[in-house]
Amino acid sequence: MVTGDPVGFRQLFTNLLENAVRHGGQPDLVVVDGQAGAVELSVRDNGKGIPEEHRERVFGVFERLEGPSGSAGTGMGLAICRKIVEVLGGGIAIVATTAPTSASSCRPRWRPAGRPRS
């Protein structure tokens, strides 16, 4: 069981899914019980992907890869996601997928309440 602020979880899921829809169109959400008892959430889309050199940058406040003429957004969504996951004692990253497209997967991880850190 994962415990935490329900508003924070709702914001995390909303931001990740809206981002995937905005930039990819077809999000895929997977929640797994990861290694050493950590929970991993993977949100993958079929968009163009995020180049490796920008994967950390997109978690900055007001950071967007597209210019003003690109899709709508404030550049706050992934920064908020990072903060929520860090409060839960976890981390979040963009990783390349093995899908036939060049999409990326956003993977927050955290430890459920009551599970020791290893």
Image (spheres, helix red, strand yellow):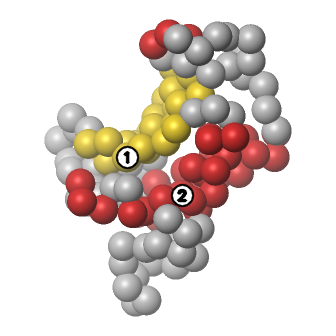
Q: In the rendered structure, which amino acid carries the disc numbered 1?
A: Ile
Report the residue at 48% width, 59% height from top. Answer: 59
Q: Is residue 104 left or right of residue 61?
A: left
- Work out whether 60 lies above or below 33: below
How many other residues sit within 10 Å of disc 2, few (<14), some (14-19) or many (≥20)? many
**Residue 97 x/y as whole percent:** 26, 38
Find residue 94 and name its label: 1
Q: Is residue 86 left or right of residue 45?
A: right
Q: Is residue 3 left or right of residue 109?
A: right
- Work out whether 41 lies above or below 85: above
Report the residue at 63% width, 32% height from top. Answer: 89
Report the residue at 34% width, 55% height from top. Answer: 55
* Residue 102 seen anywhere in this rendered image of the structure: yes
Q: In the rendered structure, which amino acid carries the disc numbered 2?
A: Leu
- Work out whether 19 lies above or below 43: below
**Residue 104 x/y as whole percent:** 32, 47
Q: Quadrant of the N terminus?
A: top right
How many other residues sit within 10 Å of disc 1, few (<14), some (14-19) or many (≥20)? many
Secondary structure of residue under mark 2: helix
